[in-house]
Image: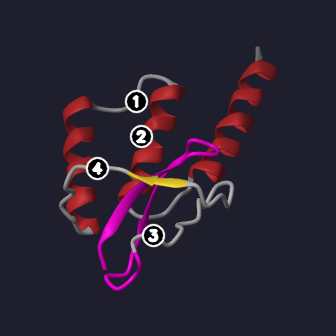
Amino acid sequence: MPVFEFRCLTCHAKFSTLVGMTQDASSAVECPKCKGVETQKLVSRFQRGRSEDDRLDEMADRLELYGDPDSPTEMRRMVKELGKATDNDVSADMESLFESDMESDIESE
């Protein structure tokens, strides 16, 4: 089944979804954010599917090239990218960890 990108005309969210080959072109696609059915199919770039190992190798190469993150913001960005590379969204867990770490830094000052 092909993956198509859509934009919700209600909340303006952009999302991708699998659409069956036999699905009627006029049938509504539901927005995962607001559940609206007023959506517009977008023209998107071709995306080459990569394995998790390929994505992790790319992240490792980038980390090796740039070194350790210099700031909490940079660390957050890296963790989010790593979560995407592993198809494992850990950003909420890591965000709470960063917040508690920042609070303990403030208290120790």
Q: Which residue corresponds to mark 4?
A: 43
Q: Which residue corresponds to mark 2?
A: 78
User: Which amino acid is tagged 4?
Assistant: Val
- Residue at 35 percent across and 62 percent down: it is 4
Q: Which residue corresponds to mark 3?
A: 26
Which residue is most to the bottom? 22
Q: Which residue corresponds to mark 1?
A: 69
Nearer-N-terminus badge (4/1): 4
User: Which amino acid is tagged 3?
Assistant: Ser
Point out the stretch of residues depicted in magenta: 1-24
Q: Position of residue 33 (x, y in %)?
A: 64, 55
Crowd band around label 4 with a 10 angstrom C-alpha radius: few (<14), some (14–19), many (20+): few
The answer to whether mark 2 and mark 1 are in CB contact below 8 A is yes
Crowd band around label 1 with a 10 angstrom C-alpha radius: few (<14), some (14–19), many (20+): few
For label 2, the SS is: helix
For label 3, the SS is: loop
The answer to whether mark 4 and mark 2 are in CB contact below 8 A is no
Question: Which-is-in-front pick, marks 3 and 4?
Answer: 3
Nearer-N-terminus badge (4/2): 4
The residues bearing labels 3 and 2 have C-alpha atoms spaced at a distance of: 40 Å
Crowd band around label 3 with a 10 angstrom C-alpha radius: few (<14), some (14–19), many (20+): few
- Residue at 51 percent across and 37 percent down: it is 76
